[in-house]
Image: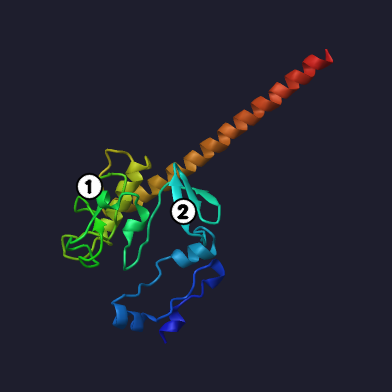
Amino acid sequence: KMNSLAVDLSSYGIAAPELGFSEANIRYGRIGTFDQGAIAMIHSRRIKVRCARLASLSGREACFEDGSQLTVDAVVLATGFQPKLEEFFNEPERYLKKGQEGKGCGTSYLTPLTDGRCRSSVDDSLFFVGFDQAVNGGLSMGFWGWSCGFLIAQSLGLLASEARFSLDALPERQRDVVRKRRLERLTSVSLFGVGLVAVVIGLRQCLSDRTR
């Protein structure tokens, strides 16, 4: 049974789908995918699930309808088979257009205006992975998906601007990003430590002056 391959994530706020793999494929053309490590990351809390509807974005803060906030580096909108991207834009007509072929969801939906490589042609800080056709005719969720991830890392300053994408160099690039993030955390901790030492020295000096 296909159910034996499924994992119950309801305790993390992820509800099981109403239909199984085969029935969803027959009814709606939805092709099930096999986990590539996300479930283990959810169990280990490397991926944290927030069960709240996104209300707005302000600077680096994601604001939810339950009043909570989350500081983020990037926002990925996993919109599913009916994109409904217009719900995320105040001016959808500026970023989206109907009638575009090759976007993977039919021409009746508003789909993003891109450079043909999943990057918005209106705002280069926006990426729409999976909305453009790759050279081999398939949607850009494989090679081009990795390429988009590479460009996003560059736009966040996690990879050098002169770096060039290639699958052969991808593992090393990933290590570069992880290394840079670790260094940033260490720098933050070090700066905090220096500030703490300065405060302690200042307090000692103050106490010393008072006892004189």
Between 18 and 91, the residue placed more toward the observer is 91
Q: Position of residue 122 (x, y in %)?
A: 24, 45
Q: Position of residue 206 (x, y in %)?
A: 75, 19
The quadrant where residue 102 appears = bottom left
Q: Is residue 119 visible?
A: no
Between 90 and 187, the residue placed more toward the observer is 90
Q: Is residue 88 visible?
A: yes
- Any mark on residue 55, and which? 2
Q: Position of residue 36 (x, y in %)?
A: 40, 67
- Any mark on residue 121, and which? 1
Left or right relative to 192: residue 65:
left
- Position above or below: 175 against 162: below
- Residue beneath the point at 49% across and 59% down: 47
Image quadrant containing the N terminus:
bottom left
Between 160 and 60, the residue placed more toward the observer is 60
SS at badge 1: loop
- Position above or below: 142 against 74: below
Q: CA distance from mark 1 to mark 2?
A: 25 Å
The residue type indicated by label 2 comes to Ala
Left or right relative to 34: residue 40:
right
